[in-house]
């Protein structure tokens, strides 16, 4: 029994230690990333490619996700609201739900799935095939050449993606409401616009920037620290997506608390 | 030019280098031979600072590598061909070759860089047609030669070649051996080459260093290779399974 307890406590201790070591490594990596993001040289071509891959090419995924979610949200609120004859609040709740929470979170998670995974796999493959070593010998800092442009792209484009997601989500709700729930189109839009406040929109964009930063940073971190061989690449990709998703949800909670818990 | 003293390196519990000493003079072509997995590639990476040794001292041009203030200037002296070529697969061949010439302190105009790249490709026996292809579209031996062209593109003072002729046909091996010899004699570069190909050793080397079990086993002039009385070296050169080097490693 004592032995079992010892073992149990020991494994908790080991997990706590490796967790705090991990937090330390990620913090150091984050600080290095920030330093390389704000010091020259800037690799313009890499930055453009990253903006394209991370921002522009994510638009379809973001659009579709938001459209369906906005539509579903309208149906749920209508059904739920009608139980106490509050069906009329559909536009307001869809707007606030999309802009404050679902828009940023869904876009963040889709970016974690699409961008984090591909960044991690790409960098890990470069690591495994010695391309990262080759960069160093060619006097090019891998953090500057690979990490900085990707994290910049995440930080700059994801707020835009979130804005697009918010708008398309609201449009999804509007479509469903006007087509199958007999809402008046003009009233619906007016209610939406009158209800939303600047703080809602600002919080949405700030969340987007934070999530974009987390998603790209995690992809780079796990890619750069990948193990050897194909297995190393697979492991790095999996770990990057899982930790990006969890960190995004945790950050979302903290940001919501900071913005709206009065 | 390059001096290694008592270098130790382990990965986990696996000891790779166990007190390696090596000395390469300026303008000399040194060839490292030794069994697979004895740490030859690791040695090169230690000198470049890609792997940090557990203990020991590495000096390049009389200066401890951990104490060089300007990493960029330090690395700018080197050209390195990796064992697996390590080409950037998102960039076309010519941009791989001219990588160093397209950014940083050695930056040249795009046209000029491309011209140099094509010239270097020609020197490793590749025609200008491959310049705009992606590395993934080339054969293994062609990729290796692109890696070689990239290593010599900025005319470095010190060049490392990790198995430059592995995977090449005998004629191409000959071309590459001549090229390496030429770089050393004409440009006065210092070269450190790893190879398993005894023809290459004789064609390229001034000095030969044999690694065994993480230590320098034999070191001497290439002309003394055949009448050295080290049983390990003799076995290695003759490629005989009988001898002091165990075949199960
Ligand atoms: N980053 C690393 N992590 C763990 N082990 C490593 C690492 N790099 C090299 N090794 C191990 O070090 C040993 C020596 O590797 P190295 O690549 O130097 O061999 P080598 O002498 O170049 O062999 P070959 O002639 O086959 O290329 C191998 O057992 C390898 O598994
Ligand atoms: Mg090797």
Image (cartoon, coloured by chain):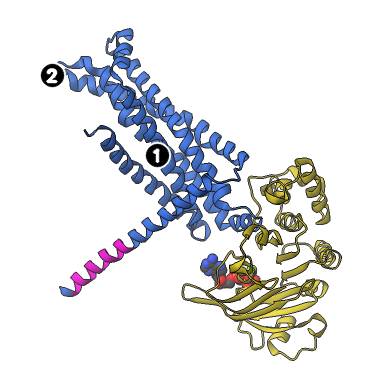
Relative to A207, say whether A132 is above or below: below
Query: In the rendered structure, the residue with mark 2 lies on which chain?
Result: A
Q: Residue furthest bottom?
A: B229
Which residue does the numbered mark 1 point to in the structure image? A211
Mark 2 lies on a secondary structure that is loop
Return the residue found at the far left.
A84
Toward the front, the furthest residue is: B69
Specify start and end residues of the magenta stretch as a single range: A3-17
Q: Is residue A246 left or right of residue B96?
A: left
Q: Is residue A261 above or below residue A169?
A: below
Q: Nearer the viewer, mark 2 or mark 1?
A: 1
- Lateral position of residue B106 relative to residue A5, left or right: right
Shown in blue, the chain is: A
Judging from the image, mark 1 belongs to the subunit labelled: A
Q: Residue visible at 75% across and 41% down?
A: B110
Q: Are marks 2 and 1 in contact (CB under 8 Å)?
A: no
Q: Residues within 10 Å of mark 2 (few under 14, many from 20)?
A: few
């Amino acid at each position: 029994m004592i032995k079992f307890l010892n073992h149990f406590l020991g494994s908790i201790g080991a997990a706590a230690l490796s967790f705090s070591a991990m937090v330390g490594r990620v913090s150091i990596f984050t600080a290095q990333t920030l330093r390389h993001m704000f010091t020259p040289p800037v690799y313009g071509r890499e930055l453009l490619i990253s903006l394209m891959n991370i921002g522009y090419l994510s638009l379809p995924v973001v659009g579709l996700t938001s459209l369906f979610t906005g539509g579903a949200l309208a149906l749920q609120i209508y059904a739920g609201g009608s139980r106490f004859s509050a069906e009329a609040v559909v536009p307001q709740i869809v707007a606030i739900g999309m802009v404050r929470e679902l828009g940023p979170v869904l876009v963040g998670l889709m970016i974690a799935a699409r961008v984090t995974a591909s960044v991690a796999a790409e960098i890990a493959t470069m690591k495994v095939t010695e391309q990262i070593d080759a960069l160093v010998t060619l006097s090019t800092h891998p953090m500057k050449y690979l990490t900085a442009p990707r994290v910049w792209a995440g930080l700059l484009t994801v707020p835009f993606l979130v804005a697009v997601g918010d708008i398309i989500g609201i449009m999804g709700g509007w479509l469903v409401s006007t087509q199958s729930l007999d809402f008046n189109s003009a009233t619906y839009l007016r209610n939406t616009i009158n209800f939303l406040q600047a703080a809602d929109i600002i919080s949405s964009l700030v969340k987007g920037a934070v999530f974009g930063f987390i998603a790209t940073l995690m992809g780079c971190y796990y890619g750069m620290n990948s193990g050897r061989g194909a297995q190393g690449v697979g492991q790095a990709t999996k770990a990057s997506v899982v930790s990006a998703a969890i960190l995004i949800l945790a950050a979302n909670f903290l940001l919501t608390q900071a913005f709206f818990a009065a | 030019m390059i001096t290694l003293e008592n270098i130790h390196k382990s990965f986990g519990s696996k000891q790779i280098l166990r007190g390696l000493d090596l000395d390469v003079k300026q303008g000399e072509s040194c060839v490292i031979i030794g069994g697979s997995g004895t740490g030859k590639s690791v040695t090169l990476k230690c000198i470049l600072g890609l792997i940090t040794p557990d203990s020991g001292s590495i000096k390049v041009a009389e200066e401890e590598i951990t104490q060089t203030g300007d990493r960029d200037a330090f690395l700018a002296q080197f050209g390195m061909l990796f064992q697996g070529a390590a080409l950037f697969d998102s960039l076309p061949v010519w941009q791989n070759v001219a990588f160093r010439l397209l950014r940083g302190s050695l930056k040249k105009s795009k046209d000029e860089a491309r011209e140099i790249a094509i010239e270097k490709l020609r020197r490793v026996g590749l025609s200008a047609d491959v310049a705009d292809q992606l590395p993934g579209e080339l054969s293994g031996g062609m990729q290796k030669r692109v890696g070689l062209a990239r290593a010599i593109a900025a005319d470095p003072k010190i060049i490392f070649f990790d198995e430059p002729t592995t995977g090449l046909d005998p004629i191409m091996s000959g071309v590459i051996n001549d090229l390496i010899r030429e770089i050393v004699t004409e440009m006065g570069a210092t070269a450190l080459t790893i190879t398993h190909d005894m023809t290459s050793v004789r064609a390229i080397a001034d000095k030969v260093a044999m690694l065994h079990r993480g230590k320098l086993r034999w070191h001497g002039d290439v002309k003394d290779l055949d009448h050295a009385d080290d049983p390990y070296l003799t076995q290695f050169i003759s490629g005989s399974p009988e001898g002091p080097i165990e075949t199960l490693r």
